[in-house]
Image (tube, rainbow, N blue to C red):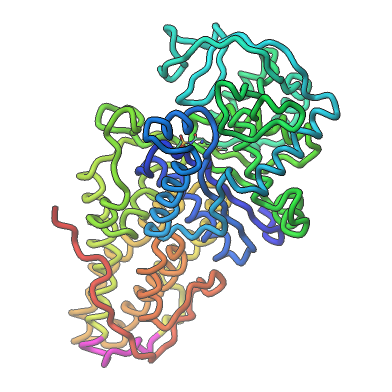
Amino acid sequence: MNTSKSFYISTPLYYVNDKPHLGTAYTSLIADILNRYQKLFGRSSFFITGTDEHGQKCEQTALKRGLTPQEHCDQMSPQFERAWKSLNINYDLFFRTSFDYHCQAVQTALQSLYDKGDIYSSNYKGWYCVSEEIFYTKKDLVNGKSPTGKEVIPLEEKAWFFKMSKYQKALREHLESHPCFIKPKERQNEIKGFLKQPLQDLCVSRPKKRVSWGVELPFDKNCVAYVWVDALLNYVTGAGYLRNEETFKKYWLEGETAHLIGKDILMTHAVYWPCLLMALNLPLPHTIFAHGWLLNKKDEKMSKSQGDKLDPLELSNLLGLEELRWFLAKEIVLGKDSAISLDLMVQKINEDLADNLGNIFSRVSRLIERNFEGQIPLYKERQDSPLQKLTEDKKKLFKGQIDSFELSQALQSLSGLLVEVNKYLEQTAPWKLVKTDKQKAGLALYNCLEVLRICGILLSPVMPRKMERLLSALGETAVFKNAEWGRLPLGKKLKHPKALFPKILI
Ligand code: MSP
């Protein structure tokens, strides 16, 4: 990654037919962590998330509740905003597709596609899945349902089409020349395979007599824009497209752009979206990273229809917010599906945070308090200690892992380092050594504190509040360039915070 460029990261916009749940919170939490990492690395970074408010699904849900779609959205969207705030998800923009400036930009963009002849009128005949807001042809259906098993309805109507097929060749070439465009590799192969078949043009309109809740087409007052076309454009309108040239240039035209999405919405992002961007003469995002699903006990996607959603706020009350963030970021390999359960969360959090990181910190600081008057021991090893070498090796890889979305691998590597610190403590036994060789005992404690300080910096995007407590006890702040061995202020009085990670007993 070129660190002089700014960074722009997005989540999908969430449908407002449901409250936030752990599956939707997962995408936002990971995007928050990746955004915080880029800020830690010293980059200017922008993080956008929000709600997808138009379309048939939203209109139907509002109707069932006896509300207008706008009233329904105005009630639901703040629930996401509040939930993300409670989860310490530090977005720069909470975007709503009902924003006026967005609707106007969608109209301008569609008008320009129409003017250049990329939109034409024809008849649509096929199937529509309201739950996914996706059009299907007969050959896409599996046992009369959508490929993911959702109900579809037959449709036949006059509609407007975007000449997506015109961009198929250019998209195929882009995929070949930009191996990081779609990640991980399995998803890239999926799209490459899909693009071997001729690409159909995309229906981009809905007649108002059936769906009126949407952005009116500027060239046909009887239709609204297809909700996915409207929603996908958020990534550029949020960055300032047709509104703020300066931010648009900084983040979209010249920055490094990344869309974090779930693998279920790969097709819309990796095919429709780049074709639309090419038609609008706009640069494509650098990376579209599709993560896997959080699975329930039956190995199915956790979802509203399965009725087994976990509430992220309840979980964060039960386990601790930063502990929950740690579990999701470390245990789930980004891109893979992962079965999760409360038992597994408690077990892993206790192992990593209570028994390891937290325990090392309280043991070491207690020993320093008792034997060194609470001051960081005035001994520093002249030669490299084994812990120094290990820490430096892991740190060298760390930034590259984060930059290439290997978040879980990077955190597992630091967790492994802390296991080594625990072993080192057992081997050197400073509580015994202090009676016979105070200098050596001091050295051992110094080495442990150095690893804790460096890990405190490197883990701050995942657990910002607890790592701030750890670092302030050591007189340090979370700045990436400080994560160098040997900066610990010798002789400084250690602040002894109360236990960082109490054991979870459920
Ligand atoms: N509104 C569209 C996205 C439009 S973006 C221009 C949408 N919304 S959604 O609310 O249904 O899903 C949003 C995201 O939540 C998707 O990335 C989806 O994969 C993710 N998740 C929902 N349930 C999930 C799990 N059980 N596990 C992991 N992520 C899941 O699609």
Is residue 487 toward the left or the right of residue 352 in the image?
right
The residue depicted at 85 percent of the width and 28 percent of the height is 116
Q: Position of residue 29 (x, y in %)?
A: 44, 51
- The quadrant holding residue 423 is bottom left
Q: Is residue 497 above or below residue 418?
A: below
Out of 361 and 36, give the one closest to the viewer: 36
Residue found at x 34% / y 32% = 304
Is residue 109 toward the left or the right of residue 157 in the image? right
Report the residue at 53% width, 75% height from top. Answer: 482
Q: Is residue 39 above or below residue 56?
A: below
- Front-lying residue, 404 or 322: 322
Magenta stretch: includes residue 371? yes
- For the record, the magenta segment spans 369-379
Across and down, in percent, residue 280 comes to: 78, 36
Q: Nearer the viewer, residue 264 or 346?
A: 264
Q: Main secondary structure of the magenta part?
A: loop
- Name the quadrant containing residue 420: bottom left
Q: Return the residue nearer the eye: 146 or 347.
A: 146
Residue ID at (37%, 42%): 19
Specify the farthest residue to the left. 506
- The picture places residue 6, in percent across and down from the top left corner, at 68, 58
Q: Tell me, yes or no, whether the highlighted magenta stretch contains residue 424.
A: no
Horizontal side of 89 relative to 444 (left or right) equals: right
Q: Percent x, y for residue 315?
A: 27, 51
